[in-house]
Structures are given as structure tokens and as C-alpha cells.
Image: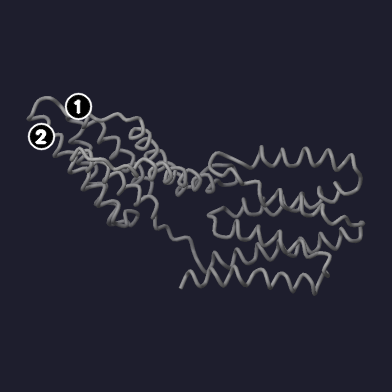
Amino acid sequence: MEKISVGFTCNFFFPFLFFTVIIFFGMKSIMAVTIATVLFKVNYKKKQSWSRLIRVVLLQCILCCMAYLATLNLPLRIILNFIIPFGLIFFTTNQFNKLAYFSELMTFVFLQLMPLDFRGFVFQTAAFLYALGCFFAVTIIYRRMHPAVPKYAQERKGLLACAQWLESFLDDGKVPETERSLYQLSQALYQDAFMRHGGREIVNMEGKVSYIFALTFQRVAYFIGSGQKMKWSEKQEIRIGEKEYVRNCVCYLKKAGTSDFWTQETRKELYSEGKELLITGEAHDTEIYTAMQNFIRPFLIILDTLK
């Protein structure tokens, strides 16, 4: 049902904007439809704050004016076409979203393809503002219809991947896809944390949770990729205790990965169990116990953050 609603929203936005822009502003302003549609598809499902969305709209308005100035004469065109693309790439891209400049750069380039006099620019700007207003309004409606209820699908998938790797470690087996899967999950969660910046570039609670999960999964992926292996103790009685502790940690991670750990009742139960595992691990100083604590401690921090 949600997929149908999403498909209807996307399919409805373009024809509505296309016909209304032609009716109100004429065919010469049709470029605003393409730009606003791309902007809508890129942003409407992202978990961005309202302040960030407002900044997206303001940046589009500035680029609309810059594109008009670039059509006035050749020197301005050369200077602006050197400065604007460089500035967009430098200030908007990051290691988690290397194509963040795409919709903004498209606005600047496409609007230059239709040189206008000042009267035409006023009409085009009005059409552009109308299209951006529609983008903002439909995004608000979509968010009201589909409130962001956290399901932590990626986080649970990562917890289960960690549990799978630990099981393979117990059986001396190999899980070749675990490293790549955890690394991809960490990058997606880093990007999610980046998108949750507020007006002062400070992440909210959900962003902190995404960041801690991302950091944990990335560390595990790097450890697996390094080819190193945790070593069991040489003494049999200690080794038996280590394996039992690892099995308990595997069960704990599986339970966390298959439960709604963000709900109050489940969160309290998992926090209590994790605390017991942590206390047990801290009573020993072998490599295995220390490594297992590196799985449990970040998750306890996450559970405490979710309060």
C-alpha cells in the first residue's frame, strides 16, 4: 500500500506541475518543471530537517539568478561557469554523498540554455518559485502521510551480520560477504547521520544512533578485512569459558537484531542482559573477552541514547 502511495505521489507531481506551469506562465517557463521534479525525487524521501529543506529551496533561487546573470555577457558567463560548479562541488559533496551537487548544478546549467530578457526572467523566476513552492508543499504532505517511524532495518541487518561472523569464528568457517555488507551498511548509516544535521550542523538523537552503529560496523568490517583473527587462550579451561561467552554474545546480538530494540520494554530487557554480559567480560582480561565487549558496549550506549 505504501509503495502504491509513493508511486502515485511521484507520478502525480510531474503532470500536475507541467500543466499548471504552462497555464499560468506559458511554455517558455517549462524548464522549471524539469528542475523541480528532479529536486522533488531527490529530496522528498530523505530524512532531512525542515531547515535543510528551506536552505535547498533558497539555494535554488540563488542559482536561478546566477544563471540569468551568466546569460548577460561572455565575461560573466565564463567567470560564473568557473566559480559556481566548483563551489557547488566543494561545498555540497561529502564522502557519503559524492553526487550531492547534481540537482543544483543542473539548475544552473539548464537555465542558461534559454537566454531571456529581463521580462522573461521575471516570468521564469515566478514559475520557478511556484514550482519550488509545489515541491515544498508536496514534500510536507508526503511526510504527514508517511511519518518517519524508525524501524532500524539497516541497523538490525548489521547486528545479525555481526552475529553471523562471530558464529563463523566459533566454527572456524568463512563468511565472505560479511565484510562488504557491514562496510556498505556503515556508509549508508554515516550518510543517514549526516542528513540528520540540524540548523547548527549538530545531529539529533536519531543521527547519534546512526553514527554509533556506523562506527561499530565499520570497525568490524576493517577487522575482518585486515585478515587478523582473534586468538583463543591456550589453557583449555579458559578457552571453554571464552567460547561460551562468545556464544552468549551471538545470542544477544541475534536477539537485538530480530527485536524492536527501540521500544521501551525491549530496550530495558536488552540493556539489562547486555550489562550482565559486559560485567562478565570485564572480569577477564583475555583478547576474546575484550573483543566481545567492543560489540556489547556500543550497543548499550545506543540503548541508553534511545531513552
Q: How is the image coloured?
A: one colour
Q: Residues within 10 Å of mark 1 (few under 14, many from 20)?
A: some
Q: Residue 130, position in %: x, y?
A: 75, 65
Residue at 49 percent of width and 48 percent of height: 192
Residue of label 1: 286
Q: Residue 224, position in %: x, y?
A: 33, 35
- From the viewer's perspective, is residue 153 above or below residue 215? below
Nearest the viewer among 106 and 291 is 106
Dot 1 or dot 2, earlier in sequence: 2
Q: Nearer the viewer, mark 1 or mark 2?
A: 2
Figure label count = 2
On screen, residue 92 versus residue 203, left or right, reads right
Q: Secondary structure at mark 1?
A: loop
**Amino acid at pointer 2:** Ile
Nearest the viewer among 50 and 227 is 227
Residue at 54 percent of width and 55 percent of height: 46
- From the viewer's perspective, is residue 45 above or below residue 71? below
Residue of label 2: 240
Q: Residue 149, position in %: x, y?
A: 44, 61
- Examine the image and state in which quarter residue 92 appears: top right
On screen, residue 124 versus residue 1, left or right, reads right
Q: Secondary structure at mark 2?
A: helix
Residue at 48 percent of width and 60 percent of height: 148
On screen, residue 213 versus residue 228, left or right, reads right
Residue at 84 percent of width and 65 percent of height: 28
Nearest the viewer among 133 and 93 is 93
- Examine the image and state in which quarter residue 95 appears: top right
Work out how far the residue at label 1 is from the one at label 2, CA to CA, in angstroms: 13 Å
Q: Residue furthest left?
A: 237
